[in-house]
Amino acid sequence: MTASELPPSLIRTLPGSSYTDPQIFALEQEKIFEQLWFCAVRASDLDKPGSFRTAQVGRESVLITRSRDDSVRAFLNICRHRGARLCTEEQGEVRRNFQCPYHAWTYGPDGKLVAAPNLAGMPDVDRTTYGLVPVHVREWLGYVWVCLADEPPSFEADVIGAATQRLGDPEAIERYRTEELAVGRRIRYEVRANWKLIVENFMECYHCATIHPELTDVLPEFAGGYAAQYYVGHGAEFADDAKGFTVDGSAGVDRIPTVSEDQDRRYYAITVKPQVFVNLVPDHVIVHRMFPLAADRTVVECDWLFLKDVVEAGRDVSRSVELFHRVNVQDFEACERCQPAMDSRAYRSGGVLVPSEHHIGAFHAWVTGRLGD
C-alpha cells in the first residue's frame, strides 16, 4: 500500500488549504453564502415597525427591518449614492426612515429613496431605481432567512426539505411550534476556526465520549460514537435516570404540548446547510446560526427557545442552557485546536474519516460541488 492509498475503513478529508486559504474562503462566500438561503435573525428581534438588525452574509452587510405594514424586508446595507454603510449598528430602531450619515440620502422602510439634499432639483432621478437594493426574504421557524441570489433556490427543498428529510416526517418539526417560542437565552461565541470544522464537528459523535461527559450522561448512546444526524427519523433517547435535557439530568421546564409521544424524551439534531443547526428536545429548541467572517474566524449565535409562558414568568432555565453551553464550549475549543494544524505539512493532503464519520464525506462533496471543483 502506497502512502497515498487508504485502507477501506478510512476516507480522505478535504485538504488543509480548504480551511485556511483566503481565496477558497472568498469563493465559498460567493458560491455558498451569497447564493443559498441564509438564516439571519430571529423575527421577534424585529418587534415593532422601524426596528432593524444587520447581518453579515458572505461579503455583504444586509439590513433587515420591519415595515409599517408589519412585513419583514431586507436590503443590502449600502447607500446608493457613494456606497457608505447605511446602518453601522448591529441593531436599533428608526422612527420613520433610514438616513445615510454621509450625505443624508434618506430611504423609507420599503427601500425607496424619499429624500436627499437638492433632490427636488434632480427630477430625472427615479426614487425607486435609486432605492436600496432588495434581498429575498422568507420566514420559517420564527427566523428571517435571506438570499442574495438573483434567482434564489427553492426554500421548500433546500431549507424545509432538509429538516423534514432528516426527521422522516414532514409534520415532525412543526410540532415544536418553534415560531411561537420565546428566546430564553442567547449566547454569542467567537470561534477561531473555519466554518467547515464546526459543521463537521456537529455532524459526528465520534468525539462525544471524549469531550462531552455531561451530554453522554443524558444521551448514553452518544458514548458509542453514534451520530445523531446519521439515521433518518431517529432521535437519541434520554437515559433512564434523566428527567430532562439538563446539565445534571434534573427535570427541565414545561414540555411543548404539541410534541408527540414518539418525540418525548428524545433529542433530534438537524443541519440545514450552509450555516444552521437545529436541536430539538421536548421542552425547548436550540438554534445555532453561524456567521463565517474569515477563513479562521466564525461567529456562532445560539438561541435557547422555550414556551413564552416559561420565559415571561422568569422560570429558571439555567440548567437547560448550561448543558448545551458546555457542549458548545467543548466543541468550539476542539475546532480551535484543529485550526492551526490545517496549515501543517502533515495535513497538506488532509486527514481521514473513520466509518462512523463517513457521512461527512457527503458534506465535503457538497462543498466542492458548490465551488465547481
Image (spheres, helix red, strand yellow):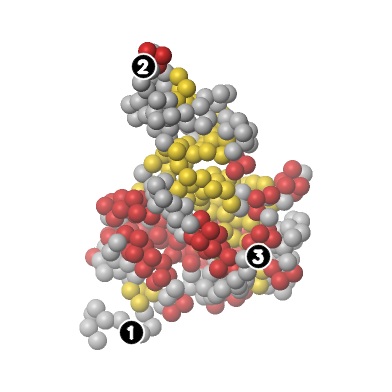
Q: How far apart are marks 2 and 3 (CA)?
A: 56 Å
Instruction: Give the left or right position of residue 128, taking residue 318 as reference.
Output: left
Q: Nearer the viewer, mark 1 or mark 2?
A: 2
Identify the element where label 1 is drawn: loop
Residue that carries the numbered disc 3 in the rendered image: 172
Q: Residue furthest bottom?
A: 1
Answer with mark 1 or mark 2, whichever residue precedes in sequence.
1
Q: In this view, does 294 lie above or below 10?
A: above
Q: What residue type is labelled 1?
A: Pro
Q: How far apart are marks 3 and 1 (CA)?
A: 39 Å
Task: Find residue 233 and report its horizontal and vertical position in percent.
Answer: 60, 72
Task: Find residue 304 and report its horizontal and vertical position in percent.
Answer: 62, 52
Task: Find residue 3 and report its horizontal and vertical position in percent.
Answer: 23, 80
Task: Find residue 127 and report its horizontal and vertical position in percent.
Answer: 43, 25
Identify the element where label 2 is drawn: loop
Answer with mark 2 or mark 3, whichever residue precedes in sequence.
2
* Residue drawn at (30%, 53%) of the image: 27
Asked whether 89 or 247 is in front, the reply is: 89
Dot 3 surroundings within 10 Å: few (below 14), some, or many (20 or more)? some
Asked whether 227 or 230 is in front, the reply is: 230
* Residue drawn at (57%, 35%) of the image: 66
Give the quadrant of residue 337: bottom left
Residue that carries the numbered disc 1 in the rendered image: 7
Residue that carries the numbered disc 2 in the rendered image: 122
